[in-house]
Amino acid sequence: MTTLLTDHWHHGGGAWWFLAPIFWISVWVLIIVAIRGLFWRRRRHWHWHNGGGAFTVLAERYARGEIDEAEYRQRLEVLKKQ
């Protein structure tokens, strides 16, 4: 039995030799994808939170008192039509 295993190991290891590199490449790809996904989610959340578009800017201006309700509703209708 020992001779059989030793002989098999010294003659190339059979068809299993390609699985180790595939495994480690897969592990590294998964790590890179996971790290990229974490940063992409944070950036996407930041973009949504800090730059939500014209509707958000209009609502913020109304909340700060820069424009009155009539102007807010008028501009909101214009944005909805676009």
Image (spheres, grey):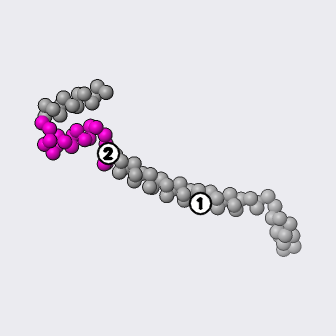
Q: Is residue 7 left or right of residue 71?
A: right
Image coordinates of residue 46 in percent, x first then y, are: 35, 51
Binning the other alpha carbons within 10 Å of mark 1 as few (below 14), some (14 to 19) or many (20 upward) gives: few
Relative placement, left or right, of 76 versus 46 is: left
Q: Percent position (x, y) of residue 60?
A: 21, 43
Classed neighbour count for the residue bearing mark 2: other residues with Cα under 10 Å, few (<14), some (14–19), many (≥20) = few
| Residue 36 seen in the figure | yes
Residue 1 makes an appearance in the image: no
Which residue corresponds to the image point at 53% horizontal and 54% vertical from the top-left?
33
**Residue at the (28%, 28%) spot, across then down:** 80
Which mark identifies residue 60? none
**Prevailing SS of the magenta stretch:** helix
Question: Residues at badges 2 and 1 in contact (C-beta under 8 Å)?
Answer: no
Q: Is residue 42 above or below residue 81?
A: below
Q: Name the disc covering residue 51, or none.
A: 2
Q: Position of residue 81 (x, y in %)?
A: 28, 25
| Residue occupying the far front of the picture | 66
At 13% from the left and 34% from the top, the residue drawn is 69
Q: Secondary structure at mark 2?
A: loop
Q: Nearer the viewer, residue 75 or 39?
A: 75
Task: Using the image, tell me which numbered label, if any, was put on residue 28.
Answer: 1
Q: Amino acid at mark 2?
A: Gly
- Look at the picture and state if 40 lies above or below 63: below
Quadrant for the N terminus in the image: bottom right
Q: Which residues are magenta?
A: 49-68
